[in-house]
Amino acid sequence: MTFSWLPNAISLLRIALVAPILILILNGSFGWALALFWLAGFSDGVDGYLAKRFNWHTRLGALLDPIADKLLVAGTFITLAYTQHIPLWLAAIVILRDVVIVAGATIYNFFVRPVQGEPTRISKLNTALQLLFLMFVLSRAGFDWPDQISITVLGAAILVTVVISGVDYVWSWSRRARSEE
């Protein structure tokens, strides 16, 4: 019996966790929101590990995993900006980058060739920083730890990596599209 379906099921679980996390934040239950957010982040690592370790890659999984990540991160950024725990401009920049990437991938997929969903190193770093930032913000809101300077430094690092990774995606996909002509 094969468990090749397991990474996809874990991605679906991560998608299902988004709504409860956002509701908990809106209700001010930051400890529970942090616990579920941590579980969602941990599950991202587990499904990636399983897919790579046992070669359980599927086209569905290549789509589900980034969708789950985008929903979790974007939803949490929007909700924390709405509740005034993070600056609106930071949430807007993070969301704008994701919109540009998704729109670019969609256009590339339909007009050039199917997109291979492999993120770049800078994009992986950006995602890791975003997840850490969101966990720090939730932890600060619920437990008054870590200090604000740690969150500010992480926010600045996110700003830098958002810009670099967004430009990197646009540049590399444009270059690939031109070479396909």
Image (cartoon, rainbow, N blue to C red):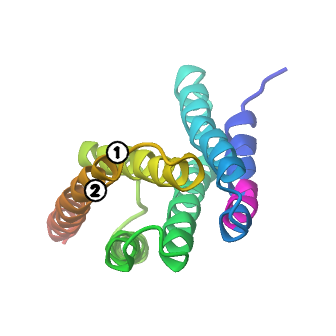
- 95, above or below 62, in the image: below
Q: Residue lying farthest front?
A: 144
* Depth check, front residue: 22 or 114: 22
For the point 34% across and 45% down, the residue is 124
Kindly identify which residue carries mark 2: 152
Residue 40 coordinates in the image, percent (x, y): 64, 45
- 30, above or below 178, in the image: above
Q: Main secondary structure of the magenta part?
A: helix
Label number found at residue 173: none
Nearest-to-viewer mark from 1 and 2: 2
Q: CA distance from mark 1 to mark 2?
A: 20 Å
178 vs 109, left or right, is left
Residue 152 coordinates in the image, percent (x, y): 28, 56
Circle 2 crowding by C-alpha within 10 Å: few under 14, some 14–19, many from 20: some
Residue 68 coordinates in the image, percent (x, y): 60, 56
Secondary element at tag 1: helix
For the point 55% across and 64% down, the residue is 76
**Is residue 75 within the magenta segment?**
no
**Of the residues shown, which amino acid type is indicated by label 2?**
Thr
Q: Is residue 86 visible?
A: yes
Position of the C terminus by quadrant: bottom left
- 55, above or below 163, in the image: above
Residue 101 coordinates in the image, percent (x, y): 35, 69
**Of the residues shown, which amino acid type is indicated by label 1?**
Lys
Q: Is residue 111 visible?
A: no
Secondary element at tag 2: helix
Label number found at residue 124: 1
**Residue 100, quarter of the rendered image:** bottom left
Q: Report the span colored magenta.
A: 16-22
**Residue 158, quarter of the rendered image:** bottom left
* Depth check, front residue: 18 or 79: 79
Position of the N terminus by quadrant: top right
